[in-house]
Image (cartoon, grey):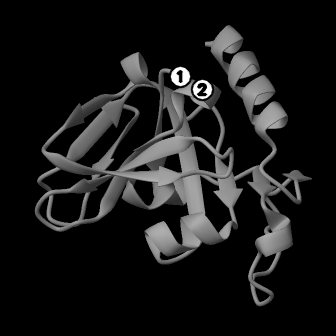
């Protein structure tokens, strides 16, 4: 049995992996709010670490890095099922939304970014150990490299 699995609302898109996410980050930026309808909880993996199945639509958008990223949604129910961050920033990475995990209740973000755009009614979670006002690209890249080394 896989350590983590999940998918979209209708079940047409699914994913599975034997690994925990490299880290879990809460993004409070306006882009993520608009593309998800709420703030985003990203769970990045190397593309080879997760099996994705099902048809998706791809939507290009300018991410917080200023480069083009791609949001993938289920072709049937239109739930955002993963992001492909800009290759200039995180090549070979796929980011799954925490809400699509069957095991979401066992996972929590440790880092949040774009706190300068955080909605004022959102409270700070006890699980957050680092917060960044902006995009935290350097910090995210360092966390990815560290996580890759530890796998």
Would residue 87 be found to the left or right of residue 114 on screen? left
Which residue lies at the image location 83% right of the left edge and 66% below the top edge? 115
Question: Which residue occupies the foreground of this view, 137 or 9?
Answer: 137
Q: Quarter-wise, where is residue 138 in the image? A: top right
Where is 142 relative to 11, above or below? above
Label 1 with label 2: CB-CB less than 8 Å:
yes
What residue lies at 53% left-to-right and 27% top-to-bottom? 87
Q: Is residue 102 visible?
A: no
Q: Which residue is mark 2?
A: 88
In what element is the residue under mark 1? loop
Mark 2 element type:
helix
Task: Judge by depth and name the residue closer to the eye, 125 or 85.
Answer: 85
Q: Which quadrant of the rendered structure holds the C terminus?
A: top right
Question: In this view of the protein, which residue sits in the foreground, 15 or 34?
Answer: 34
Mark nearest the camera among 1 and 2 is 2
Q: Position of residue 35 (x, y in %)?
A: 46, 67
Q: Judge by depth and name the residue closer to the eye, 110 or 76.
A: 76
- Residue at image x 83%, y 35%? 139
Residue picked out by circle 1: 91
| Residue 111 locus on image (x, y percent) | 78, 50
On screen, residue 151 above or below 59: above
Q: Quadrant of the N terminus?
A: top left
Relative placement, left or right, of 15 versus 45 is: left
Residue at the image position 13 percent from the left and 43 percent from the top: 54
């Amino acid at each position: 049995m896989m350590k983590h699995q999940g998918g979209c609302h209708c079940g047409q898109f699914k994913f599975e992996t034997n690994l925990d996410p490299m880290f879990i980050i809460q993004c409070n930026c306006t882009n993520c709010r608009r593309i998800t309808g709420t703030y985003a909880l990203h769970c990045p993996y190397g593309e080879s670490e997760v099996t994705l199945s099902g048809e998706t639509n791809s939507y290009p958008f300018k991410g917080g890095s200023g480069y083009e990223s791609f949001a993938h949604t289920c072709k049937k129910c239109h739930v955002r099922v993963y992001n492909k961050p800009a290759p200039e920033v995180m090549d070979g990475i796929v980011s799954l939304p925490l809400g699509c995990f069957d095991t979401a209740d066992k996972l929590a973000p440790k880092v949040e970014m774009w706190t300068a755009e955080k909605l004022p009614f959102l409270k700070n979670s006890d699980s957050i150990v680092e917060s960044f006002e902006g995009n935290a690209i350097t910090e995210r890249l360092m966390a990815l490299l560290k996580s890759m080394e530890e796998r």
